[in-house]
Structure formats: C-alpha cells, structure tokens
Image: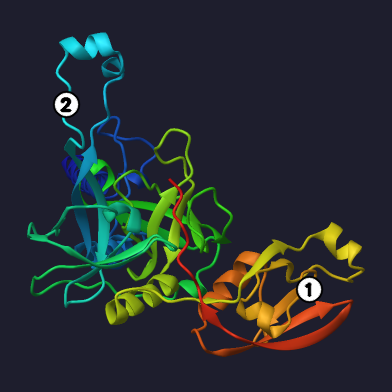
C-alpha cells in the first residue's frame, strides 16, 4: 500500500510540474486559463517585419533640410481715412502726410536647389519685397536677394551667402502619374518645416482663374496652406517634382485641391534666370481657342485636335509667315499638343530667331508653314 501511494504522489507531482510549465510558456494550448483574463497582443519579432510597414520618413528626412522658410517685409501705402474727405472733420483731425507707408510682413517657403546658395520660390512670395530673410532647418538665417523673377510661371530665384547648404535632388516630373504618392513640405502659417501627405490628383491642369499665363500644374490633395507657397512637392524617393504654388479654396485654407509647378518647368526657369537674370520665351503672335466637338463638326473634321487660330496680330512672326485666322494648328516641329495652353507652352520653349515648322489644317487640308520665332513681349500684370 505504501509503494502504491508513493507512485501516485510522484505521478501527481510530475503532472503538476508539466501543467505549470505549459501554462507559463504556452497558455494558448490549454482549454482554460489558470491566470484569469489575459489579453494577448501581437508584436513585431524582427526589424525586417518593421520595414514592411509603409512609411515615407526616409523621403521626408532626405528633402526637409533643403526646404527653407522665407520671410519678407515690404512697404505698403497707408490708405487715407474716409473721414478726412469731409472738410469739416479734416479741419479738426490731423491730416497724415501724402505717401505715408507702413511695414507689411509675409511668409512663404523656398527650396535650395544648389549648394551655391540658389533657392527656388514663388514670384508672388517675394514680389515688391524690401527685405527677404531665409531660415534653414538647422537654425541658420541669412538675408537673401532676388536674382530674377518670372511672374508668367510664378517662379523666382533667390541667392543666399552660406556654406554647406543641403541642395534638393530634382526628380522627373514628366514621369509623374495620377495616383502617385507625394509629400508637400513647407512653412504653413509660419509653424516651421511641415510635411503633408497626398497623391497626384491630376496632371497638366490649366485655365485656372489666376494671373499666370503659363499653366501646366500638378494637382495634389496633399495639404497646402498659406505659407506653403514656394515649398517642395516630392516623390517617395525624396526628389523634387514640383514647387507648390496655389490652392483652390473658398476659405483660404486647404480643401484638398492644391497646385504645384512641375520641376521640369522650374528647372528651365532656374537655368535662364541664373544665366541671364530673366526668362526669354518664344512667341508667334496669334489668338487661340481650344477645339471642341462643335468646332470640329463645323470645319467638317473627323476628330478633335489642335487649336483654332482666331486672330493673327499684324506684323507678328505668324503674320509674316502667312498664318491666317481660321487655320487649325495641330503640331509644332512635329510635336502635337492637347490644347491651346499646350501650344502656348510648346512655342514658349523655342528661342527667338529659331525657325519652326507649323503643321496646320486649312480648308480641310494639312499644310506646313515655316515661321521665325519672335520674343514674347512682357504682359501687363492684373491688379
């Protein structure tokens, strides 16, 4: 009997020990939980698992040092108080001197594009500024001067005299696709370097109700707010694909419709301003209208393409070459275009004095005319 009791005790001890080990190391194998209610969570086991999570921190880290805050100061004329129009009140009130001004401050963003100190920003950010100061992410500050400005694309180039500057890498904006993930970096409301996330919503946006003749915007839903103007729109590699320019909003804040100037356009403007101090564009001197279904049917054309020439200005390159109102221009140097804005941008890339072949439709027949490109005159700015 004693021997049987010892065997039972040893067996019970082994079973209890096994149960303790299993309940401690693998409680999920038991049908009940000896420790009461336990919440089981899943954790990443390796660094490789962590990298599977989608993050754009590397892209932001690469580009953020090259995006600067731009602070401007300009003199604004003080408006005359309406009470002073009354001669009686003017007798008792002090009449301020004519031409009195006050200081007005503004803020924006910019992108360092060269370690020599060149910065791209928007023309409207630095327009009429008396003083311009640039603040870098490393806390350095410097006075900046305007090298040149191009209101026709809303771009300007600044120059600062600092060393060891982090220049951004230019991407290929012409290869951007609708749906691509993008990041907008800038200085919204003066808060400092800020990154917002979105996608490319559309490409080649034009005909926006803004005073910029050459429009070929990248549309994005990445938040762009006041102060972001002149900042960077980058791809997931941290490369520049656009300069943030404007938003469509009834409130003045982002509603998910922002516009950026393609990096390819910004690069062309940058090179011309650095080399010549200004931008020169080609011009032929015609009025244009987009083709549509109704126009194509009235001209008895099988498809909709090109741009209708509505007017030829006297003495212009187009007039001298024999272009006529009613002609439908479909290609320049064998390069087709989608609409009149595309034609405007295409001709603008040509240099004055250069010969160009215009392919057009006249009386339902294709013909070709050679024109000598002229220099685009400066356009008056709208107030």
Quarter in which the N terminus is drawn: top left
> Along the horizontal axis of the image, is 68 left or right of 262?
left
Crowding around mark 1 (Cα neighbors within 10 Å: few <14, some 14 to 19, many 20+) is: many
Quarter in which the C terminus is drawn: top left
Q: Is residue 69 above or below residue 336?
A: above
Q: x, y percentage for residue 71?
A: 18, 50
Q: Using the image as rendered, state which of residue 7 and residue 301 is in the foreground.
A: 301
According to the image, label 1 marks what residue? 327
Q: Using the image as rendered, state which of residue 279 and residue 256 is in the foreground.
A: 279
Q: In terms of image quadrants, where is residue 347?
A: bottom right
First-in-chain label (1 vs 2): 2
Tell me what residue is drawn at x 42 percent, y 50 percent.
246
Q: Is residue 129 above or below residue 76?
A: below
Can residue 187 be spotted in the picture? yes
Q: Which mark is residue 232?
A: none
Crowding around mark 2 (Cα neighbors within 10 Å: few <14, some 14 to 19, many 20+) is: few
Report the number of discs. 2
Q: x, y percentage for residue 169?
A: 30, 75
Q: Nearer the viewer, mark 1 or mark 2?
A: 2
Q: In terms of image quadrants, where is residue 61?
A: bottom left
**Quick one: SS at disc 2?**
loop
Q: x, y percentage for residue 242?
A: 40, 65
> Along the horizontal axis of the image, is 348 left or right of 290?
left
The residues bearing labels 1 and 2 have C-alpha atoms spaced at a distance of 59 Å
According to the image, label 2 marks what residue? 96
Can residue 12 be spotted in the picture? no
């Amino acid at each position: 009997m004693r021997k049987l009791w010892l065997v039972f005790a040893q067996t019970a001890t082994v079973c209890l020990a096994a149960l303790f080990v299993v309940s401690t190391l693998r409680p999920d194998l038991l049908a009940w939980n000896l420790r009461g209610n336990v919440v089981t969570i899943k954790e990443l086991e390796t660094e490789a698992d962590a990298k599977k999570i989608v993050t754009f921190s590397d892209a932001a880290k690469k580009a953020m040092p090259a995006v600067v805050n731009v602070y401007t100061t300009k003199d604004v004329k003080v408006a005359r108080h309406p009470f002073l129009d009354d001669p009686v009140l003017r007798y008792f009130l002090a009449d301020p001197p004519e031409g009195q001004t006050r200081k007005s401050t503004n803020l924006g963003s910019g992108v360092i594009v060269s370690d020599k100190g060149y910065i791209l920003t928007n023309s409207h950010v630095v327009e009429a500024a008396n003083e311009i100061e640039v603040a870098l992410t490393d806390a350095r500050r410097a006075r900046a001067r305007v090298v040149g400005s191009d209101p026709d694309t809303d771009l300007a180039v600044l120059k600062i005299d600092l060393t060891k500057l982090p220049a951004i890498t230019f991407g290929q904006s012409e290869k951007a696709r609708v749906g691509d993930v993008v990041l907008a970096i800038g200085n919204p409301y003066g808060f400092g370097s800020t990154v917002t996330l979105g996608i490319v919503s559309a490409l080649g946006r034009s005909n926006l109700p803004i005073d910029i003749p050459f429009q070929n915007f990248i549309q994005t839903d990445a938040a762009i707010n006041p102060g972001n103007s002149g900042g960077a729109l980058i791809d997931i590699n941290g490369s520049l694909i656009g300069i943030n320019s404007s938003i469509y909003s009834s409130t003045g804040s982002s509603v998910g419709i922002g516009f950026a100037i393609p990096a390819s356009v910004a690069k062309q403007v940058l090179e011309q301003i650095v080399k010549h101090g200004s931008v020169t564009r080609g011009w032929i001197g015609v009025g244009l209208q987009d083709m549509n279904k109704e126009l194509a049917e009235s001209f008895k054309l099988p498809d909709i393409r090109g741009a209708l020439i509505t007017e030829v200005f006297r003495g212009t390159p187009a007039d001298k070459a024999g272009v006529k109102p009613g002609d439908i221009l479909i290609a320049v140097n064998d390069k087709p275009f989608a609409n009149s804005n595309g034609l405007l941008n295409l001709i603008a890339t040509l240099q004055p004095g250069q010969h160009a072949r215009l392919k057009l439709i006249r009386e339902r027949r294709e013909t070709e005319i050679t024109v000598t490109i002229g220099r685009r005159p400066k356009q008056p700015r709208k107030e």
